[in-house]
Image (tube, rainbow, N blue to C red):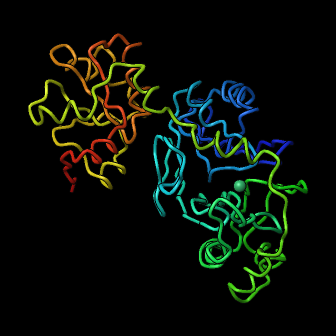
Amino acid sequence: MLFRQLFDKTSSTYTYLLASRRGGEALIIDPVFEHTARYLKLLEELDLKLVKVVDTHVHADHVTAMGALRDATRCVTVMGEQSPAEVVSMRVSDNDPLTIEGIKLTALHTPGHTSESYSFLMDDRVFTGDTLLIRGTGRTDFQNGDPYDQYHSLFDRLLKLPDQTLVYPAHDYKGDTVSTIYEEKTFNPRLQVNSADAYAEIMNNLKLDNPAMMDVAIPENLKVGLKLDAQRRVPAVDVDELLKSWPSIDAQLVDIREEGERRRHGVIPGSLHAPYGHFDQYCGASGSLAGIAKSTRVLLYCAVGERSTLAVEIANELGLKNVAHIPGGFKAWQAAGGKVEKLN
Ligand SMILES: [Fe+2]
């Protein structure tokens, strides 16, 4: 496995790069905007294809590189379903798997630092975001933070992991790089409490200044996605237009979400499936979409319209011209009252 822990000095943020092999797919957790070029160079050096980028929560102390990495590599942006960020390609819920080639993470909803904070568990290690830090915990005094939620996220979730589980946090201000669940249970001063009230008492009396970047970082991080305007830079058919003639539409619908998302949320009836992760294979000369596009228009959709925008661009570059997408994706379809079919 390839594993890199990268550091941002300004905000003391750790960014993690994961891949199962050289030449394979990669995933990045909590990237910092200023280091976008460094990440891209490292990906190139290790011959990796970035396919997913994850933020554990909406950061207040740095601007995320999720948008910049998506624009550079067309990777999928991922956050928790509770995230207030406007457009994120793919949202995960508690206990959802998050996979790339050869690597599986499990999403753990661990609110407290923010209401939408997630940790990600992978075999022998857990990426704890700002929920559990080394000999510390993330502050709970803004962004819907709540010390009681955090107490439960810590004591009922993270500290229940096996003692030897490695702890990789999103920050360290002292230069520590890794810990274990056992060490934090035993030596983390904030965790030597025997009730949620006692924990809240500590957290409510920290009297911390707001992070220097907060007024810049939070608004930037909320609007990281490709909004509807940007989604219309490629040929698009709006949900309203589609519903006017539904179900007799003059196109073949193609769902490009992952199987897990389809099973959880359902699909638009009559859709074929061509997952975004291998979308180029469907567009090549012998690909199934290339054949369909010869006789009818191909209409792509994903969860919120971000991946499908990028997919139309991929299709066009591979010579497939008869392709459009649905801005706002499945979410817009559902919001407009479009019919949804559940998969068994
Ligand atoms: Fe944070």
Q: Nearer the viewer, residue 325 or 284?
A: 325
Q: Is residue 85 left or right of residue 154?
A: left
Q: Is residue 160 left or right of residue 256?
A: right
Q: Is residue 113 left or right of residue 307?
A: right
Residue furthest out toward the right: 174
- Tell me where residue 269 sits by quadrant: top left
Q: Which quarter shows the N terminus?
A: top right
The x, y position of residue 13, in whole percent, is 78, 48
Residue furthest out toward the front: 215
Measuring 12% from the left and 35% from the top, which residue is drawn there? 246
| Residue 69 to residue 214: above or below | above
Q: Is residue 190 left or right of residue 69?
A: right
The x, y position of residue 196, in whole percent, is 68, 84
| Residue 200 to residue 194: above or below | above
Measuring 57% from the left and 30% from the top, which residue is drawn there? 49
| Residue 268 to residue 233: above or below | below
